[in-house]
Image (cartoon, rainbow, N blue to C red):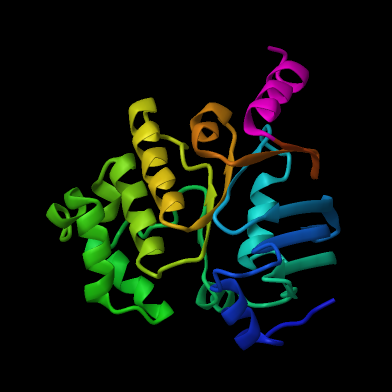
Amino acid sequence: MTSAKIGDAKIDEGIRSPDRAEPLLELSGVRAGYGSIEVLHGVDLVLEPGAVVALLGPNGGGKTSTLKICSGVLPVTRGEFRLAGQVVNGVEPSELARLGVCSIPEGRGIFANLTVRENLWIATGTGVGLAELEEVAYSRFPILGERRGQLAGSMSGGEQQMLALSRALGTHPTVLLLDELSMGLAPRIVSQMYDVVGSLAAEGISILVAEQFARAVLPIATSAALMLQGRVVKTGDPLDIENELSTSYLGG
């Protein structure tokens, strides 16, 4: 099933409307895989406007593949991926980005051999000017202004994550997809990064975040979903999901 580029104007209007009745982003019975291997087996997931949904579970459960569906990188083989109530199966990642869906993949997705400023320049492909991208980046993370001429790969992990977030925020997303924001970062830096994510949610950005370390994201989550073996097995209050994850699946 595909509906690529059908009704984009309506989706664009709907996804940015403060009076939207439908979920902002929704997966309904979504199946997907790599080649002949199916890794998602009927995923149901809802992101309401202004929500922070924590997608939790151990490695290999399907969290990253689910985010790839939401960013358009992994195609849906069965089921429906909807934005503002409109089916967007088959829509290209660049088009989803134009509609306000921005993804920060596992590993941050920056260009290590380019400077901070050059990394921001690449994000101008979404239609936002470099000056605006730099203003967003340097005002929120002043250290990036000091590092603007430095190769991104030579910065600390926390600074690289700041750069990845800045590239996303400069495009003024409606939906932000975060995959393992804590990966490779010291606990203090993880706490700082999730403080930033919490402030973004307070500014009205809807956020879906996949995270193996539940305690990092749960303080800012409005709801949580537990994912195991390619299925969402439980959704609900973050504390309830954390308890379920700890006692039933992690033995503690």
Taken as a whole, is the magenta stretch helix, strand or loop?
helix
Frontmost residue, 9 versus 92: 9
Instruction: Examine the image and state in which quarter residue 130 appears.
Output: bottom left
Instruction: Examine the image and state in which quarter residue 36 appears.
Output: bottom right
Position of residue 43 measured from the top left corner of the image (x, y, whole percent): 81, 52
- 246 in magenta: yes
Q: Is residue 250 above or below residue 7?
A: above
Rendered residue at 72%/75% (across/down): 88
Q: Residue furthest left?
A: 146
Q: Is residue 11 left or right of residue 216?
A: right
Rendered residue at 28%/41% (across/down): 156
* Residue 106 visible in the shown view: yes
Position of residue 83 measured from the top left corner of the image (x, y, whole percent): 67, 70
Q: Which residues are magenta?
A: 237-252
Rendered residue at 26%/73% (across/down): 132
Q: Is residue 42 above or below residue 252?
A: below
Instruction: Examine the image and state in which quarter residue 9 appears.
Output: bottom right
* Residue 76 visible in the shown view: no
Position of residue 128 measured from the top left corner of the image (x, y, whole percent): 35, 78
Q: Is residue 91 left or right of residue 166?
A: right
Q: Residue furthest top?
A: 252
